[in-house]
Image (cartoon, rainbow, N blue to C red):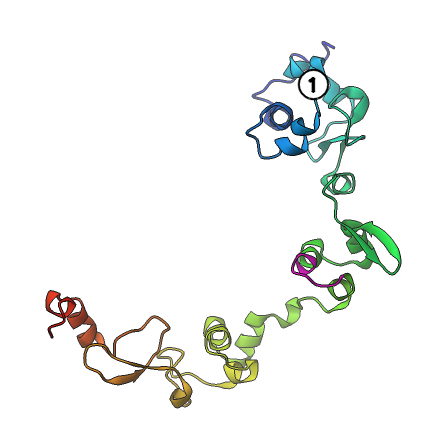
Amino acid sequence: MQKYRNKVTIRDNSRLYNIWRKMKERCYNAEFDRYKDYGARGIQICQEWLESFDNFADWAYENGYKTNLTIDRVNNDGNYEPSNCRWITLKEQTRNTRNTKWVLYRGQRKPLVVWCEELKLPYDAVHNRIEKGWTVEDAFEKPLFDKDNSWVKKCKKYGINPTTAKDRIVKFGWSEEEALNTPTLKRGMMHNKYADRHITEICPVCGKKFVKNTVRKKYCGSKCLGKSKTNSFKRGVL
């Protein structure tokens, strides 16, 4: 096992060293966040690897290690040792982990990542749908976000700022049609021909009723805002 000793150093191969270091933490450091899935389950590292990074590096290079691969245990209940480890891609590893998400669809049970590959669907988007409580059928079959009809492009088509349109819908309950078709006067999202429909407040300084042009606005103008900061106003005296 001396073939790679002088070629594989911690400095020259930090990625492989980090794999070795994290492997030890998973198995022997009770403070490590993944310890419960490894060391707490009795997963150990063979003595040859545990006592020497060089030994682990020699095995890695002799058994197909590349920078785009990750270490995998063939038997998830087995130890980290030459007879139970291999180098595979991250995608392949997701199919062999205890945390792989399996789903039943059309009478067949497969890992979610496999279904997404077969149906040509983005894994993250589908996974998020299922995590939010969507049925598998809806997660797979309902149309996904169309990049060619994105919110930004839609707002650009109607000549309105995307943030303004989003605030109208989320914060003020407008329909999408109103949010996109209602023009602004470039003085804030609330100042337009539909201002009478917007939220109004009573200025705590002068008592004047005013239309809010931002959600956080509390005073009718800068004059009252200035008064609100004075000590006399804080004591209740204008």
The image quarter in which residue 230 lies: bottom left
Q: What stretch is highlighted in magenta?
A: 128-135
| Front residue of 76 and 41 | 41
Position of 86 with respect to 148 (left or right) is right
> Horizontal and vertical percent for residue 125?
67, 58
Q: Quadrant of the N terminus?
A: top right
The local crowd at label 1, few if under 14, some if 14 to 19, many if 20 or more residues have their Cα within 10 Å, is: many
Give residue 22's quadrant in the image. Answer: top right
From where the camera sits, is residue 10 visible? yes
Is residue 134 one of those drawn in magenta?
A: yes
Image spot of residue 149 (x, y percent): 64, 72
Seen at 89% across and 58% down, the residue is 107
Residue 205 spot, x, y in % from top left: 19, 77
Horizontal relation, residue 210 to residue 58: left or right: left
The location of residue 43, given as percent across then percent down, is 71, 25
Which residue appears at 78% of the width and 58% of the height?
Answer: 120
Residue at which label 1 appears:
56
In the picture, the quarter occupied by the C terminus is: bottom left
Could you say which is closer to the camera, residue 72 or residue 109? 109
Between 144 and 156, the one lying in front of the other is 144
* Circle 1: residue type: Phe
Left/right placement of residue 219 relative to residue 17 reads left
Q: Does the magenta stretch include residue 45?
A: no
Q: In this view, does 59 lie above or below 211?
A: above
| Residue 7 in view in this figure | no
Position above or below: 49 against 141? above
In the image, residue 93 above or below residue 74? below
